[in-house]
Image (spheres, grey):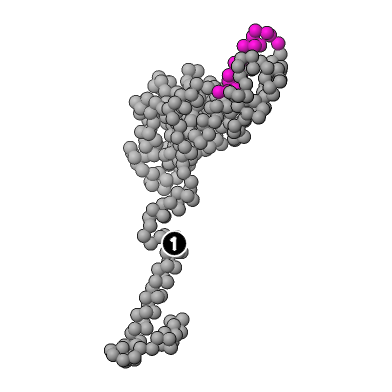
Amino acid sequence: CAFALRLFFSARFPIHGGIHSGTDQKGNFFDTVLLTMLSSTFRRAVMTASHIPAKSSVLSNARRAFAQGPAAGGHISDELLEKLGSLSTQALVDGLWVMGWPSAQIDGARPLHPSHRCVGRAVTLNFVPARPDIAQDKPAGGESPEYEAFEKCGPKEVLVMSSVGPWESVGGDIKFLRLKQREIGGLVTDGSVRDTDEIINYGFPCFSYSTTARQGPAAMQPWECNGVVSVSGVTVRPGDAIVGDQDGVVVVPAKVAEKVYSIAHGREQIEEIVKAELMKNPGPPGKFYPFMSGKIKVDSPLGQLLASKGITPENSNQFEGSADW
């Protein structure tokens, strides 16, 4: 290839006179041009093969971020967070169901005490099965991912810990003292917790699969803070709203939180009206209930009952033709 290129240049670009008239000088000129071309081509080939731009670390990071996707799905304001917390987990599940979203209830998380109820933005922590190199490579001591997650939590955050198994311990007394000091909004895990009495005394809401006396590090290691995690098969992204009560824990995706609230709040209003009517005029609830949001007919018994209370398609998205999702 190099010989052919040299012949081509000799034929097309003969050099005459002056210091370039000699054979050696001509050969040196051709060799310089050829080496420059091959060197440039080689650099481009190497950079293409490694997918690393020559001078753009920003572009490299952008490509990686695009390949992975953002961890968080949006931001939930304090005002919206408070409104979501005023609703029952049933209403929130129903709101997501009406929209056609996947199941959002974390079935493997139960309240540690009957008084526990929580609402907050998710801070996530992912555990992975224990392995010697994982234990060696994980940042040690106070730099561990679990303590990074602890420090991101406050009264408006809920720490969501994804365990490798329901009976494995995600922590207990000494570790969770820091969560008490941070006045955390709650802790949710599909694993188990230990030192139950102490955790209850700490006062922050805790939802777990169960309790255990096991040590966690023998089975798993904390690996990543604020990534996308799966908790009992439910996806949780950092910043999602986490709402827990005696019926369980529900994840409200940040991206659709406003719409979920609108639907769920409308459903709760209707259920309160139906219940009040049935208490006033006892009878089977089938006349009014159950109902499908966005499908209530104006001339149905429920539609007429709602109209008598000032709820119509003009001010509610629960009627046929008024659905806005």
Picture quadrant of residue 153: top left
Residue at 51% over, 31% down:
257
Q: Amino acid at mark 1?
A: Ser
Residue 140, percent from left and from top: 34, 41
Residue 306 visible in the snapshot: yes
Outermost residue toward the front?
Answer: 314
For residue 105, above or below residue 307: below
Residue 277 vs residue 39: left or right?
right
Residue indicated by mark 1: 50
Q: Residue at 37% of width from left, 37% of height from top?
A: 148
Is residue 54 toward the left or the right of residue 162 in the image? left
Q: Nearer the viewer, residue 190 or 154?
A: 154
Q: Main secondary structure of the magenta part?
A: helix
Residue occupying image coordinates x 47% and y 37%: 74
Q: Which residues are magenta?
A: 265-283
Q: Is residue 30 or residue 184 the one in the foreground? A: 30
119 falls in the magenta region: no
Q: Is residue 254 left or right of residue 289?
A: left
Q: Position of residue 137 (x, y in %)?
A: 38, 47
Q: Quadrant of the C terminus?
A: top right
| Most foreground residue, 156 or 196 | 156
Q: Is residue 167 left or right of residue 14?
A: right
